[in-house]
Image (cartoon, rainbow, N blue to C red):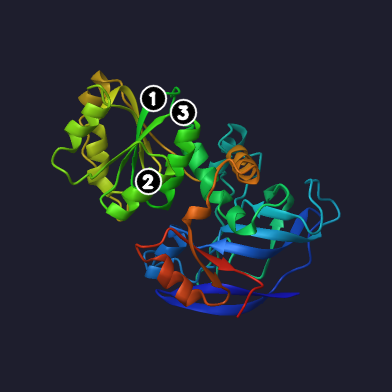
Amino acid sequence: MNTRTIEFVAPRELEIREVHLPPLEPRQVLLKTKGCALCTWEQRFYKGGSPDDYPFRGGHEVSAVVEELGPDCTVDVRVGDLVAPALKTRCGSCYYCRRGLDNQCENDPEPRQAGEPWGPGGLSDYLIVEDYQVYRAGPGVDPDHLALAEPVACVIRSVTRPGLFPGDRVLVQGAGMMGQLHILLAKKMGFRVLVSEPMPVRRDQALKSGAEVVLDPTDNHFREAVLDETGGYGLNAVFFTAGGGPAIIQALEVMAKGGWLCLYGSVHPSGEVGVDPNHVHYDELFVTGTFSHTRESYREAVELISQGQVDVSPFITERVPFPKVDHGFERAISPDTYRVLMTFGQEH
């Protein structure tokens, strides 16, 4: 059978291609896409931030319905089930998979050939995945909400990374989509959440998401405000989601002894950040990073969304029917949106 898919061929140049899907292998699953959120990763491709990586087939925040199962599938799903596919390879046998770091699987990157498309391919009517990549949703789940299981899974890994306790004081840097999810999940873990965000509208949403204190990082009294809110000790953890090098330096200036700096977000363009090693040494600071999601964090994300314990509905800013992808991406890169969702099977 054939499917339509979106191919990124150049900055702000998208093409709809019809491609042939091969027959299912014994442990593969054919999915019919319901929704695909337009993540910041795909937005960078759209804007031209990855000039050496075209052509690219994006889309990895997906909800779908099971259309067909290979004869040897062992996953507990049936035809017609609503699922969230985790579009990452987990070979289970490489060095990192065996150490519990399956998000760092050595066999994950696709071999790329010049001029040949690559990528997760979730912006398609249909896609084929491995059976272990499929996670079934609970009854009555909105497919649009389930499409955000992937970013929720990434944030679960982030907020559980530091060794924290209920009641600890944490700062979320940036109140965009990923910052808002950090607020929701940090509150669920019992932390007292402060937020650093320069945009007033996003600070307002941070309060609605559960932040107790919102601060402007450009305020000259930012450090004093943080110390005042933490009894003079500083923060037990800072979750960096946005702000670049200056935000990372600012975080190190407001951390308590034994505090954690968790670099959830990447920095573009990449560059060095000056850190005083004696500050890290004497204050016993932890600097760590998190990348993507694991099997376990993905399972937890689907469960939390299925049970209604994490409400992602405020962050679906707009729904755009496939194949109006140009309009969808222009809206997605606008600062007044959180997530724009491409919907399938609802063309008009």
Q: Classify residue 225 as left or right of residue 98.
A: left
Secondary structure of the residue carrying numbered label 3: loop
Q: Are marks 2 and 3 in contact (CB under 8 Å)?
A: no
Callout 1 crowding tier (Cα within 10 Å): few <14, some 14–19, many ≥20:
some
Is residue 137 positioned above or below 318 on the image?
Answer: above
Q: Hey, what amino acid is under mark 2?
A: Ala
Q: Hey, what amino acid is under mark 3?
A: Gly
Q: Classify residue 319 as left or right of residue 268.
A: right
Residue toward you, 167 or 112: 167
Q: Residue 190 carries which label?
A: 3
Residue toward you, 110 or 69: 69
Residue at image position (66%, 65%) is 33
**Residue 317 appears at what percent x and percent y?**
46, 62
Q: Classify residue 2 as left or right of residue 344.
A: right
Placement of the N terminus among the 4 image quadrants: bottom right
Secondary structure of the residue carrying numbered label 1: loop
What residue does disc 2 label?
206
Q: Residue 168 carries which label?
A: 1
